[in-house]
Image (tube, grey):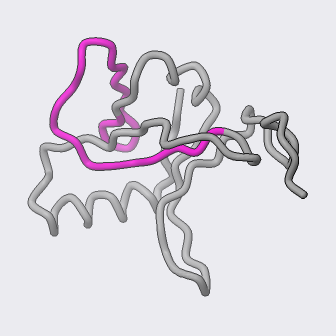
Amino acid sequence: MIEITEKAATELRTLMESEDKKDHALRIFVAGMGCSGVQYGMALDNETKEDDVTVTDKEIKIVMANDINEELSEATVDFIETPQGNGFVIDNPSEMSGCGSCGGSCH
């Protein structure tokens, strides 16, 4: 089951409150493919689709399409702060990564 870190949960609660979206869930979706593998996107959403899977961790509802649920079974949503900026990230240890994982050339 996908998990959310305490820091990410705190940041999400703050974001949801400031945007008056306390009734929303964190939707995770496939945003594209690249040499480093699947690129996931995240958004606050208050609608569910028929094929959605919903999980709750640290009182945050997480929604995703059923077809990516298994891919994200060991993933963690985190919030990072770097010199380049702050944001939410998905750490997925089961995801293949590295140059060439898409079958293409990175040169």
Hey, which residue is sitting farthest bottom in the picture? 83
Residue at 64% across / 31% down in the picture?
74
**Residue 77 at x, y percent in the picture:** 52, 49
78 is higher (above) or lower (below) than 4: below
42 is higher (above) or lower (below) than 85: above
Is residue 59 something that shows in the picture? no
43 is higher (above) or lower (below) than 92: below
23 is higher (above) or lower (below) than 13: above
Position of residue 10 in the picture relative to residue 31 (left or right) = left
Position of residue 15 in the picture relative to residue 106 (left or right) = left
Was residue 6 drawn as part of the magenta stretch in this picture? Answer: no
Q: Main secondary structure of the magenta part?
A: strand
Position of residue 14 in the picture relative to residue 101 (left or right) = left
Hey, which residue is sitting farthest left in the picture? 20
Residue at 21% across / 25% down in the picture?
48
Quadrant of the rendered image containing residue 94: top right
**Residue 32 at x, y percent in the picture:** 55, 41
**Residue 81 at x, y percent in the picture:** 55, 76
Q: Nearer the viewer, residue 57 or 97?
A: 97
Q: Which residues make up the magenta segment? A: 38-62
Is residue 2 something that shows in the picture? yes
Hey, which residue is sitting farthest top in the picture? 50
Quadrant of the rendered image containing residue 92: top right
**Total numbered labels:** 0
Residue at 80% across / 43% down in the picture?
97
**Residue 98 at x, y percent in the picture:** 84, 48
Residue at 73% across / 35% down in the picture?
95
Was residue 55 drawn as part of the magenta stretch in this picture? Answer: yes
Look at the image and tell me in which quarter the C terminus lies.
bottom right
Q: Nearer the viewer, residue 78 or 102?
A: 102
Position of residue 54 in the picture relative to residue 97 (left or right) = left
